[in-house]
Amino acid sequence: MKLTGSMLIGANDIVGMTKEIKAINPATGEFLEPAYLGGTKAQVEQACELARTAFHSYRETSLEQRASFLEQIAEQIMALGDDLITRASLESGLPKGRIEGERGRTVGQLRLFASVVRAGRWIDARIDHAQPDRKPMPRSDIRLRYIPLGPVAVFGASNFPLAFSVAGGDTASALAAGAPVIVKGHSAHPGTSEMVGRAVRAAVVECGLHEGVFSLIFGTGRDVGQALVSHPSIKAVGFTGSRAGGLALMKTAAARPEPIPVYAEMSSINPVFLMPGALKADAEKIAQGFVASLLMGAGQFCTNPGLAIGVDSPELDAFIKAAEAAVVVSPTATMLTPGIHKAYETGLNQLVLNPDITVLARGKDSDAPNQCQSALLCTSAEAFLKDSHGLGVEVFGSSSLIIKCTTAQQMLAITEALEGQLTATLQMAPDQDEDLVLSLIAALELKVGRILANGYPTGVEVCDAMVHGGPFPATSDSRSTSVGTAAIYRFLRPVSYQDIPDVFLPAALQNANPFAIPRLENA
Amino acid sequence: MKLTGSMLIGANDIVGMTKEIKAINPATGEFLEPAYLGGTKAQVEQACELARTAFHSYRETSLEQRASFLEQIAEQIMALGDDLITRASLESGLPKGRIEGERGRTVGQLRLFASVVRAGRWIDARIDHAQPDRKPMPRSDIRLRYIPLGPVAVFGASNFPLAFSVAGGDTASALAAGAPVIVKGHSAHPGTSEMVGRAVRAAVVECGLHEGVFSLIFGTGRDVGQALVSHPSIKAVGFTGSRAGGLALMKTAAARPEPIPVYAEMSSINPVFLMPGALKADAEKIAQGFVASLLMGAGQFCTNPGLAIGVDSPELDAFIKAAEAAVVVSPTATMLTPGIHKAYETGLNQLVLNPDITVLARGKDSDAPNQCQSALLCTSAEAFLKDSHGLGVEVFGSSSLIIKCTTAQQMLAITEALEGQLTATLQMAPDQDEDLVLSLIAALELKVGRILANGYPTGVEVCDAMVHGGPFPATSDSRSTSVGTAAIYRFLRPVSYQDIPDVFLPAALQNANPFAIPRLENA
């Protein structure tokens, strides 16, 4: 596919008029053609107006129409073939194999949401039939369904150029809910964004939908994003990125004449708790799994294990020794962008300069540009508890801090001191440390969205039971997930219909149940 | 029951130390003993600390324990007997029959939530079983349940001293979700609040729960409310009241280091659309039903029909004539408080002084204190569209504005111009005005939480399919309802458990399904 450098506003290719964006191949530092110009406020408004118009027909597409559309997007993405893999790899520095896997996840996600749409469980249809003879007052016929909030603004993430970007989880779940989507493509991968955007547009055309169902815009800085989130036609926001970026969007959304929900996934250091019994059983194996998770994708995952907590002991020493050994031989890995690389170095240096932190090991170094040199740090529980926000800061990349506790009880104190997180992991042995495990799980439930045993937090399954979310500041809204089928609920609201004649009811609530969906009915 | 003037902080009766609150009998203007002193910041903190502690055990009560607790509250409220009815009637000016009905609604609601808790559908338990042989990667065992957000602050409403107050819908749904509750009692009915608060406390004792599961505090002005909403232990807020009050709480909640959800129900004028066919069929009967709904409870309902929209025609004239006739003979009714009465007069005067508004009819007048004299006003569609926020302002009380349209299409323009509302009503005849009805329903779905046909908006059924909510500024969060069983979802968030051994899983997710709840299971 020939890239044009255009934004995709409905059916039109529209070139921006503000600051130029060019992707950089982070492995070489070279700029990649073409240039993309950022959108103006008027161009953002054009996309919003189209989305507003499209909403009326799109939200009432049949379940089958909407599901087919999602499947068609998946097909169109696959039809991009190797061009997409090559471009995404160039723009992100991620190996082709990883991008291929991510494409599989992306199209799998779209197809899963197609099945979610068809099943219709998300409509949560409820029917309380009339009780004309009830005393002292008759009951009306009352029916409920969930409808989409309205057009959704999606901000593509840097670290998943496919799965959390133009046709990623936020877009898939919003489209599944019946919401038109305007994506602000991430400036790190505009070419990938254009390719995927064209695939989505092709699906819109193929399915005969209103052009405003999907638009793709670009912009550096915050102007375009703020214009989008401020626009009265936008009714919800999906964002994956930095805490500063997420907080700025939350502020803008709350200050609107009509405040709107923001689903921002912002930061997490994903603590791994090393139970004494587990370390006794096999400290070395746990250390190897831990470092493998830490190094994966240059540590550029929201679920990267940035913290490990253990009780000072010969077993913890064995864990540390094995982890050090795995880290020192680890080669560097290309980071996504020069900016992310610089932030990694800066963030890591800040921790290294902290007198309470010891550097246990660094990975290999390299002269190539934008390389992540992994790092393993250590501190005491006392030091961490004294400044949990300072030492518990997210350093995006392959860096992790080990906390040595003097007692198992200190693990609980550390849990209490943690900010909200996406995940927490317990390394535990069967029939050991049971009280500690129970206490930790109870405390962690209030701090994280997902608790794992004897695994590692990287690798987020797309399924019904997944929660990729968690208390603030891991996300802006702990009541939801951005991965898995429950993500659709973010973009819905309930509406009741009282004594509305059948012919005027939405299909989901008509007596004949033409969508054949599950409904809660009370006689 | 002898009233003490105390706040109820956990198991302790604690007298406040700030400004005195005394209820007023609005029918006579006389103060009612005893005096209640407002709480201090330290007293608020005491209640919050108790709630934080109680949360740990309360959130893991069994479904049966929690359901029994809700039923016990209902029993304890009934055990208050006529004392409660007498006091609530004195403090609110509402007739005893109405208070008895409201008590029935309140205990019915508590019992309904008990059945909701037992059924366990709200847990939304999901189990994705492990797939160890899946290629290319095995799947973990992943399970999801919803857990309570944490302690909830509830602000009692003035207009329902029982059903939207100390043990009202917000409290019932929060307790059902597993959240301890701190109620700030409304200053208009502190005696009723103390009585109901003591009933809740008695149920806490009876069920052997931690004392911090429930506290009741008082306070004038905004200090106590702001201290409560700012407190780090509070994780969500339920509020029913004025727009200014709700907006202030939203602001405070968003400015916290950890922002929290606010469910504020704020204002609504509940438009009634008069279809030409319906007026042709029986304008007089519709007018009578409309005025009956308008006058009910001195118009002091969030669902009071404050707006009627029809096409200028002989049939609309017939409707107006009949409505006028019903209004002019309507006696005054005592309003809840001198403040609400004053706000009614001020708000109404402001509309009356508007040159675009004609006064069609006023109800009877009276020299008694705090009387609502009903009002029927009229304006043109042009005038309304020119200043929809000014003319569409809520005047809390028995006042309604009729808009005369020149065309049926103008009804759609008015719908577009409306702010978010709790309800909209269509008066329609069978087989007539079908296109208009369809267009109106489509437009209204995006503006309101509940659409009714051929009824009146007052009277909110407590059931599975009810939505008492709607787009901003009707509420602060359109994704939920404050009445009906779906209200429980406001106080929940999802948590995932990955590969957690069965013995450490919460009961709702254990293999044996000891709660015997419905679960979504994928092999």
Image (cartoon, coloured by chain):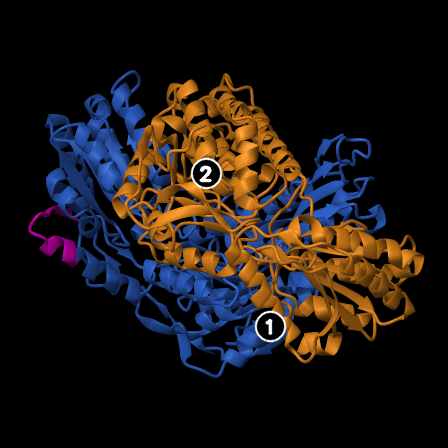
Chain colours: A blue, B orange
- Kind of residue at disc 1: Gln
Residue range in magenta is A349-363
Specify the quadrant that holds the C terminus of chain B.
Answer: top right
Q: Secondary structure at mark 2?
A: helix
Horizontal side of B181 relative to B94 (left or right) equals left
Which residue is situated farthest in the bottom direction here? A17
Identify the residue at horizontal 66%, vertical 79% (top origin).
B386
Using the image, determine if residue A154 lies above or below residue A417: below
Disc number placed over residue B191 in the picture, else none:
2
Q: Is residue A358 above or below residue A215?
A: above
Q: Nearer the viewer, residue A12 or A419?
A: A419
Residue occupying the point 48% across, 73% down: A227
Residue A116 placement: quadrant? top right
* Disc 2 residue crowd, few under 14, some 14–19, many 20+, Cα 10 Å: many
- Tell me the quadrant of the picture where the N terminus of chain B can be found: top left
> How many angstroms separate mark 2 from mark 1 (CA)?
34 Å
> Is residue B389 rendered to the left or right of residue B61?
right
Residue B25 lies in the magenta-colored region: no
Where residue A442 sits, quadrant-wise, is: top left
Image spot of residue A346 (x, y percent): 19, 61
Residue tagged 1 = B350
Q: Earlier in the sequence, mark 2 or mark 1?
A: 2
Front-most of B90 and B465? B90
Q: Which x, y percent locates residue A70? A: 63, 53
As shown in the figure, which amino acid type bears the numbered disc 2?
A: Gly
Q: Position of residue A201 (x, y in %)?
A: 63, 65
Q: Along the line of sight, which residue is nearer the eye, B440 or A375? A: B440
Q: Is residue A121 visible?
A: yes
User: Which chain does the residue under circle 2 lie in?
Assistant: B
Q: Is residue B60 above or below residue B436?
A: above
Q: Is residue A352 magenta?
A: yes
Q: In front here: B114 or A230?
A: B114
